Amino acid sequence: MYEQLRHEVMSGYFAPWTRLAEERLARRLGVSRTPVREALARLEVEGLVERRDGSFTVTVPNLAELRDLYELRVVLELRGVARAIEDPSVQHDRAILDAELSRWYAFRENPPAPDPHFVVEDEKFHAALSAASGNPALTDALVSVNQKIRRVRMYDFLTEDRIHSTIEEHIQIMELVRDGELEEGHRALHAHVGESLEVVLQRAQEALTRMSLHVGR
């Protein structure tokens, strides 16, 4: 129960500020209200939901929190490539890079329609790129940060041009790293995830605006 509700909250199943009524959730999930209440209490501890006007609602990160998380994301993203630049003995795993590239070549051949849930595919790319650098702790930290900002980032994939640019940038970055052009790959990745805090904040603000306008389930 907890895992299912957590997944739904993290994946954007519920629109921002949606009231999570215990009785309605219990009926939909085919359980009593007790496990639903317990799951919501756990999600509250994690900061994913909050009590508002006597009921639980999905938490929406504020801009200050997003700034910190986005800044951390940029650091973690770049570190995977930077460590290979600094230490020639660090080699990216070619099998991981090739497998991920194959996925994005397929996306380029048949681009998906704009969809907030495309953010999950985006996260897989960044996790794979990080994993290929050979530091599992770094990848775990990146995955954790991306999960925390997913509910905002998902609204960055609502237009065809954003889908197409993401696909092309991912392919460019991965090919550069695969071919050992690490300095160029580092610069391309930096541009992709945000060259400055101002860019990061602008993207976060735009995403929050989209969230407020989005009509959820």
Image (cartoon, rainbow, N blue to C red):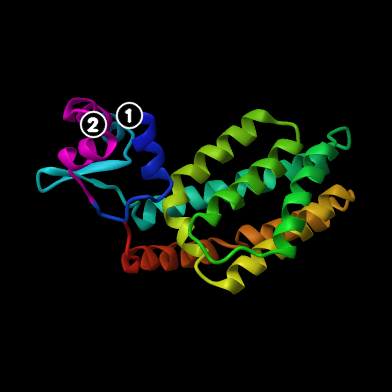
Say whether residue 96 is visible: yes
Image quadrant where one finds the N terminus: top left
> To which quarter of the image does residue 38 belong?
top left
Dominant SS of magenta comes to helix
- Residue pointed to by mark 2: 36
Residue 172 percent location from the top left of the image = 78, 60
Q: Which numbered disc covers residue 55?
A: none
Asked if residue 73 lies in the magenta stretch, the reply is no
User: In the rendered structure, which amino acid carries the disc numbered 2?
Assistant: Val
Residue lying at 20% horizontally and 30% vertically, measured from the top left:
37
Instruction: Give the left or right position of residue 148, taking residue 167 as reference.
Output: left
User: In the rendered structure, which amino acid carries the disc numbered 1?
Assistant: Met
The range drawn in magenta is 19-40
Q: Nearer the viewer, residue 191 or 46?
A: 46
Residue 63 percent location from the top left of the image = 37, 57
Say whether residue 187 is visible: no
What SS does tag 2 mark? helix
Distance from the alpha carbon under mark 1 to that under mark 2: 7 Å
Instruction: Give the left or right position of residue 100, taking residue 90 as reference.
Output: left
Image quadrant where one finds the C terminus: bottom left
18 shown above or below 45: below
Residue lying at 49% horizontally and 68% vertically, measured from the top left:
158
Instruction: Give the left or right position of residue 65, taking residue 30 as reference.
Output: right
